[in-house]
Amino acid sequence: MTTSGTPQTITPQLRQWIVEQAQAGHRAEAVLQSMLDAGWDEEVAVQALESTLEAHLAQHAGALGLPPAVPVPEPLQQESALYLDAGDRQVHVVAAVTRPRIVVLGNLLSDDECDALIDAARPRLSRSLTVETRTGGEEINDDRTSRGMFFTQGESELVARIEARIARLVHWPVQNGEGLQVLHYPPGAEYKPHYDYFDPAEPGTPTILQRGGQRVATVVMYLSEPAQGGGTVFPDVPLEVAPKRGHAVFFSYERPHPSTRTLHGGAPVLAGEKWIATKWLREREFT
């Protein structure tokens, strides 16, 4: 694959080459770098890579043995929107990625709301658990070293207000959301890269799915700012979202499979402390 100073177009031959690289097991970042090394313009290369892989995945998902895709929440109903109507608040679009679908949101929470969530959560913190998909229960996981707690749906006026804001923002029923979780990360704490969906291969997953189906999207809200570190990292993109107080990062996953490229984690807090609130959205009403 080579290119020159002539105008660059996305040809069928280029798309076929990209598919062949993917089938050979090469990561998207390596394929992109090969295109850049061959002289492709970065914008053209990224567009070719994303559109080709997305089309190939949609066409061959069944043959590849992937779970079927399902509808997912979506905050951006208009292309290149700068502001979003969240009902009681205007939210800023800071950045957006198409695949995986990631939208960084500014001004989702006020300073007072951030403080109120921390104050309400602090007395109820305990060592954070992860879902134990072999049984459908919960367990302590060495990959997750934060402390946290859950609010129930609509537990207080503050929680209900934020849940309604998120539902309007991402166009998803409020009843399809899990209870809001608040997490505290002291210096050194982290959450190593993981997926938020429930692995269909695990025996405990059918039990978990009875409460509202699969998770289809995540909203991570930053309630405080560590002095250093603590960003939300997406290794497959790659991307790191800085933990700016009041901001949030939204991402969706249309099938419970690594092809969604939604591997993510909480980078270690290097100085100070980090507080976040997480909202997971399900396919159906969460009970």
Image (cartoon, helix red, strand yellow):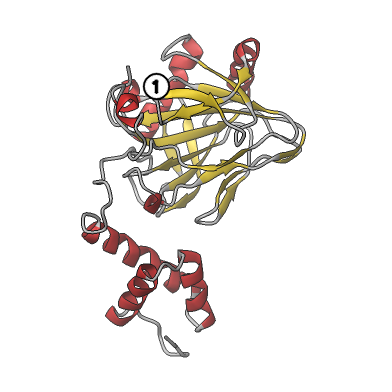
Where 66 sits versus 208, above or below? below
Q: Which residue is mark 1?
A: 164
Give the amino acid at mark 1.
Ala
Count of numbered circles on the image: 1
In what quadrant of the picture does the C terminus appear? top left
Q: Residue 94 location in percent, x, y?
A: 53, 46
Q: Residue 98 location in percent, x, y?
A: 40, 54
Where 252 sits versus 51, above or below? above
Residue at figure coordinates x 41%, y 48% from the top left:
101
Where 133 sits versus 24, above or below? above
Residue 46 is drawn in which quadrant?
A: bottom left
State the residue in front, 239 or 256: 256
State the residue in front, 90 or 155: 155
Residue at figure coordinates x 46%, y 90% from the top left:
4
State the residue in front, 202 or 19: 202
Q: Is residue 22 left or right of residue 241?
A: left
In what quadrant of the picture does the N terminus appear? bottom left
State the residue in front, 248 or 16: 16
Q: Residue 185 location in percent, x, y?
A: 67, 29
Residue at figure coordinates x 46%, y 45% from the top left:
103
Q: Is residue 228 left or right of residue 221?
A: right
Residue 168 is drawn in which quadrant?
A: top left
Name the secondary structure under disc 1. helix
Q: Is residue 62 left or right of residue 50?
A: left
Mark 1 closeness class: few <14, some 14–19, many ≥20 residues within 10 Å: some
Where 125 sits versus 228, above or below? above
